[in-house]
Structure formats: structure tokens, C-alpha cells
Amino acid sequence: MLSVAQKRAMARQMLLRQPDDSAARIAAAAASARGLAFRPVASGRIVRHVILTGATGFLGAYLLRDLLRTPGVQVTCLARAADDAAARTRVMAALAGTGTADPGPDRLRALAHDLAAQPGGNAALAEAVRSAEALVNCAARVNFTDRYGQARAANVEAVRHLLGLAQGGLRFHQVSTVAVFATGAFAGRRVTEATPPAIAPFASAHGYCQSKLAAELMLRTAAEAGLDATLYRPGLIGWDTVTGRGNAADFLTHFLAASLRIGALPRIPIALSIAPVGYVAEAIVATVLADAQRAGPLHLLGEAPMPMPEVAAALAAAGRPVELVGYDDWLARLDADAESPLRPLSLLLPDRFADDADARPPSLFDSLSTDRGVPIDDARTRAGLARLGVALPRNAALNFAAYLKEHLG
């Protein structure tokens, strides 16, 4: 029988292993957009019809909510389903989670369409494309244990398919991630909105990061042929600061829930930069509706990174005090909790946590950490959003109390 430590070591080797041809596959994806031609998009149009993908996901549902809050805007959602009725059922279930009622078929239409499969002959979609001004792609496969090949269909080929739809004159809005900046090229460098990502080794295999990079490079190629595209790069997306509703499937939720169960947070040198989902959605929708030519990229981060003592203080203020303990102690308590929300993911946690970020092995903490890898700057984004009336909430307004009540009772 293998020990937990041995199993963790095997999992770490899995994360570190990268296919030798990953760089070539990313470059090939970028080149696949060559030969496309895009009808010019006039600036200053009034956006009345938006095609949205990913509306059944956490961020996508809030994008849909905010689009529908704007009078006169119609949204066509593309969702995987057996038929359009089933697609609408899925979309409405996600929208209801944001507290939004069904706006009726005149404002919201759902079409069954699998972007990864790229089915042809969808007359309803062709009609929607002809009448729309903007396409917002929020659909993605998010799994930090994926290889590139596993994420490619949903995160790369789907974008290639959507580029075909945008050729008729749609402005393209792509939800990407700050994780496109590979540590192999950008570690220790200050990355601004003007910094272009590049093909380089990531800290671990991270097919998700590789596939999102491939999609960005594909859009860069398409932009050379006339595509008008805006990129949005969120970091860690937090909960709804009004209702406390968060993404029940993400690592942040599992990490906090598991830590509260054992009454302890690990005393480790990472800090959480939490951007509320409402802010991220509002920023994207405001930019889409402003219809600014070639806006962005936008870096959508939290107000300031919160170190573990600050997180512990926020939890205590919300009525759930926790200890700050050494990482070894925290991990031992976690392993002893048979019902821990992190139980299925525990092997992807490191068996030791080095203070020196460069000496730290890849792990799930990389999705939370701000002290390792690439420092991201969002100053230009904040200034631009302020001109649109969008302000980044302060950490004090994160409303941990509502979040804990919603997820932990």
C-alpha cells in the first residue's frame, strides 16, 4: 500500500509532465486562423443583440444577468443540449441562480449548439449571427489536471468555430485568463495589459492554461486579418458580494470550506486576490455595450491580495474564527477529515510548502497564489473601467458573512 506522501509525489509528477510537442501544437492552433477574412466593424454602434456562450457557467450566468438588465438588449445563448427547449431549460436554471426571472423569448433565446462538435447547418444560429452586433465567448473547460489535448476541443477548436461566425462583422469578446502568461517566459516580470503572452513552459502541464494561450494567439492572428476582438483576463473570481453565491465547483470554495471544517487556515506565504463575480461581469458587459473599437485587453483582479492572516480576520469578523497553523499541521488535519470537501483533490496538494516560491512544487495552490510566477498589473483596466462607471469593490466589501451563510449555513 502506498502512503499518502507517495501518492502525492506521484500526483506531482503527473502535474509536471508535459508533452514534448505542446509548444508546436499551440503554434499550430495560432496559425489555423490564417486565411480568414473579417468584415470591418463600425465603431459607435448601439449594441442591441449579443450572442453569448457559457451562460450555464458561473461567470456566464452573471454576464447574462447584466446584459438583460440593460433595456432593449436581446441575448441569444448557445448551450450544449439535445434541442433548443433543453438548452433554454439549462440557461434558465443558471440564470435563476443569480436571482433573475425569465425575461421572456423576446429578450432571451437559447439555441442547442455544441461549440466543440461544430455542427453545421444551424439556420437559427445563422439568423442570430446576421442580426447581432457582438459575440461574447465565456464557454470553457476548466480543469487544472487536463492535458492540452483534453482541453483543446472546448477551449481552442470552439474559438476557431466562433471566429467563422464572426467573419460577417461581429465584434468578438473573449473571456481568457491571466494564467496565459507562462512562468517560463514571464516569471518575475511585471505584466501589464499591453504585454503580449508568448509560448513558453508553464509551471506544470496545465492544459487549461495552454489551451487558453492557444486561443489568445489564434485571436491575435485573426486580428491581423481584421478581427475586432477584446480580451478579458480574470484572475481568481470570487462570490456575489450581495447574495454570497459563489462557484461551488472551484478550488477557492473547497479550500475555505475544508479549512473551516477543521477550524484552521495554513500559515503559508500566499495571498488571495479575489475579484467579485459581479465586478467581473459588470466590467465585461459595460465594455461590450460601450462597443469601443479594439478595447482591452482587460485584467480583472481583486482590489489587493489578501494574505492568510487577513483572510483569517475576515472569517472571524463573519463569525467563523479559525486558527493560523503551520502547513504540516493543516494538511494533517485535512487528511484526518474523511468528509473534507478537498478530499477528492487532496493528492494535488503539496506534502510540504516552501516559503521560497521558486522552491515550491506545482500544486492546486498555484491557482490561488499571488507570490509565485507572474505579477499582473491592472492599472490601465481600472482607469478605463472608471470612465465607464465601473468601480472595483474594496476587499472590505467582499461580504464573507453572506458567502459563508450561502455555502456553509
Image (spheres, rainbow, N blue to C red):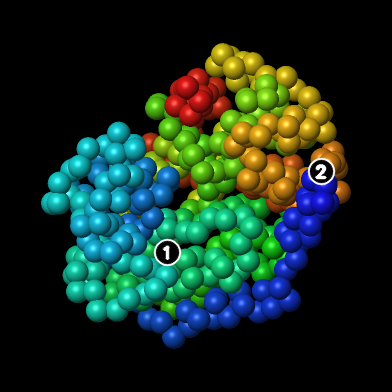
In the picture of the structure, the residue carrying the numbered disc 1 is: 229
**Image-based side of 347 in relation to 66, left or right:** right
Can you give x and y, in whole percent of width and height, for residue 269 in the image?
A: 77, 35
In this picture, is 369 found above or below 36? above
Residue at left offset 19%, top offset 74%: 123
In the rendered image, the residue lying farthest to the front is 1
In this picture, is 86 found above or below 254? below
Residue at left offset 54%, top offset 81%: 31
In this picture, is 141 found above or below 266? below
Residue closer to the observer: 119 or 409: 409
**Image-based side of 57 in relation to 188, left or right:** left
Residue at left offset 42%, top offset 70%: 116
Q: Decide: few, some or many residues near mark 1? Use Cα within 10 Å; few <14, some 14-19, many ≥20.
A: many
Name the mark nearer the viewer: 1 or 2.
Answer: 2
Can you give x and y, in whole percent of width and height, for residue 110 in the image?
A: 24, 57
Assess whether mark 2 and mark 1 are in contact (beta carbons under 8 angstroms). Answer: no
Separation of residues labelled 1 and 2 (CA atoms): 42 Å
Circle 2 sits in a helix, a strand or a loop, which is it? loop
Residue 290 visible to the viewer: no
Can you give x and y, in whole percent of width and height, for residue 222 in the image?
A: 46, 75
Residue 191 visible to the viewer: yes
Dot 2 amino acid type? Asp
Can you give x and y, in whole percent of width and height, for residue 163 in the image?
A: 39, 72
In this picture, is 175 found above or below 307? below
Residue at left offset 78%, top offset 52%: 7
Residue closer to the observer: 125 or 72: 125
**Image-based side of 213 in relation to 50, left or right:** right
**Which badge, 1 or 2, is on the more N-terminal residue?**
1
In the rendered image, the residue lying farthest to the bottom is 35
**Image-based side of 267 in relation to 380, left or right:** right
In the picture of the structure, the residue carrying the numbered disc 2 is: 351
Residue closer to the observer: 270 or 56: 56
